[in-house]
């Protein structure tokens, strides 16, 4: 029976590393030729760099190919063929899906997919869901506003593909979604970490214990929370469920996932993606574990609007170990730890917002919400951290503040001005939270 199968694709997921590399290289050459011959955007980029398909003879040659950034994709938007511009590699009539990026970092980028691409999206997600224990007997609740952002759209199709039952929680509000999960006895859910915590909070205020709802697994995306230990713990305890991380993006696809073993890393789906990690300062390619860099990624099978050596700005590092689950797909240690855009220098120290999240969520007595504001007082950088204290813990404010300051100093090497706010007074987010504001940039 398929349900007893350990891997969604037992051949590719256990292929030895050398064979995977060979497969990746062959696929890379193919998609490179595809883009070179069909897209003016790609051809122009490669001709300018003096690279032809025949020059790609080894992985080292791949590194000579220019990377593509989101800003370059923005530059061709709304041009011919409208609205995608000349990175499009298929006739417009073959495009069957429109999506756009969430716009967190600026003007959204439009993304075209053919039906074949869309099936590929669902296949990539099927690997994720199967690895996280989704099976045909699951009833999966998907509480997001089905819209122009790709979000969990492909997760929806993949859940259907593996034979599970999908309940689309589209335009329902949070309370109605909770009641639907309860009524239908749903067993699994997909949401951003912010919303997973927000829903648990909302259920409690309705007098419903989220632990009683029967959700046994939750797949997260959109934010790094499910790979931040203290946030993951809060989610798992709130729902009495296993919480799994996955990373993906509109322009890339769903490229890595945590498996049921939860070994502290995320598997890259190496059958479909080629991942390179590059040192941000030196541009050197990192092959050894333990050194962080930004992820350069190629979607090896995506055709309408190819993703070739895309500079994702995601920060990650190779994991030293293999996962006991048996998959040979390599792991990135602790998931995507942040974005190059978000990592900012404060008082000369590099600060990643995820480090602050790890501390806030590890402290008992604080709610799940927080905000960080970096500003200048004269010449000096000032960080204000706004947190909410739980109603029944008001009396411990002094102790909590001391603990918070200590832990923040330890984990980030910086001092903070702490502001306590009333429980439920900070902004609640449904999709991606905007907790970090750098006012120095204005
Ligand atoms: Zn694994």
Image: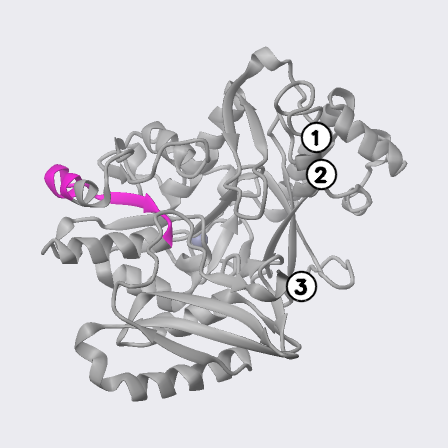
Q: Which residue is mark 2?
A: 72
Q: Is label 3 in a helix, a strand or a loop?
A: loop
- How many residues crowd around disc 3 within 10 Å: few (fewer than 14), some, or many (20 or more)? few
Q: From the viewer's perspective, is 112 left or right of 263? A: right
Q: From the viewer's perspective, is 374 left or right of 370? A: right
Q: Quadrant of the N terminus?
A: top left
Q: Residue furthest right?
A: 50
Q: Which residue is mark 3?
A: 288
Residue beneath the point at 48% across and 54% down: 266
Residue 226 at x, y = what percent? 40, 57
- The mark nearer the N terminus, 3 or 1, is 1
Q: Which residue is mark 1?
A: 76
Residue 375 at x, y = what percent? 56, 71
Q: Is label 1 in a helix, a strand or a loop?
A: helix
- The mark nearer the N terminus, 2 or 3, is 2
Residues at circles 1 and 2 in contact by the CB criterion of under 8 Å = yes
């Amino acid at each position: 029976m398929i349900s007893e199968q350990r891997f969604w694709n037992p051949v590719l997921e256990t292929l030895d590393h050398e064979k995977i590399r060979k497969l990746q290289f062959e696929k890379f050459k193919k998609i490179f030729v595809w883009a070179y011959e069909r897209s003016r955007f790609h051809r122009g980029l490669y001709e300018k760099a003096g690279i032809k398909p025949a020059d790609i003879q080894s992985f080292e040659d791949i590194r000579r190919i220019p990377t593509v950034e989101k800003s370059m994709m923005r530059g061709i938007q709304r041009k011919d063929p409208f609205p995608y511009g000349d990175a499009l590699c298929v006739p417009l009539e073959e495009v069957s899906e429109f999506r756009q990026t969430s716009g967190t970092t600026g003007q959204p980028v439009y993304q075209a997919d053919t039906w074949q691409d869309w099936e590929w999206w669902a296949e990539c997600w099927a690997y994720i869901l199967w690895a996280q224990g989704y099976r045909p007997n699951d009833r999966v609740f998907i509480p997001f506003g089905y819209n122009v952002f790709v979000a969990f759209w492909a997760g929806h199709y993949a859940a259907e593909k593996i034979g599970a039952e999908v309940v689309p929680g589209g335009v329902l509000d949070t309370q109605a979604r909770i009641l639907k999960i309860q009524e239908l006895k749903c067993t699994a859910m997909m949401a951003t970490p912010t919303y997973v915590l927000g829903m648990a909070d909302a259920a409690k205020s309705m007098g419903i214990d989220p632990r009683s709802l029967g959700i046994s697994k939750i797949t997260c995306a959109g934010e790094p929370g499910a790979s931040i230990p203290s946030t993951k713990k809060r989610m798992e305890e709130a729902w009495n469920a296993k919480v799994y991380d996955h990373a993906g993006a509109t322009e890339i696809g769903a490229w890595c996932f945590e498996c049921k073993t939860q070994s502290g890393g995320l598997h890259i789906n190496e059958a479909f993606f080629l991942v390179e990690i590059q040192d941000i300062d030196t541009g050197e390619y990192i092959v050894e574990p333990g050194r962080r860099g930004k992820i350069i990624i190629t979607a090896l099978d995506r055709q309408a609007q190819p993703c070739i050596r895309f500079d994702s700005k995601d920060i990650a590092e190779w994991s030293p170990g293999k996962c006991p689950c048996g998959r040979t797909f390599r792991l990135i240690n602790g998931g995507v730890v942040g974005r190059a855009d978000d990592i900012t220098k404060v008082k000369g120290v590099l600060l990643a917002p995820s480090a602050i999240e790890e501390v806030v969520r590890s402290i008992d007595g604080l709610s799940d919400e927080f905000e960080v504001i970096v500003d200048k007082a004269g010449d000096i950088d000032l960080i204000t951290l706004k947190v909410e204290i739980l109603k029944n813990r008001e009396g411990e404010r002094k102790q909590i503040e001391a603990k918070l300051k200590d832990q923040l100093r330890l984990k980030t090497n910086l001092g903070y001005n702490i502001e306590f706010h009333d429980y439920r007074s900070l902004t609640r987010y449904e999709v991606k939270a905007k907790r970090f504001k750098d006012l120095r940039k204005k």
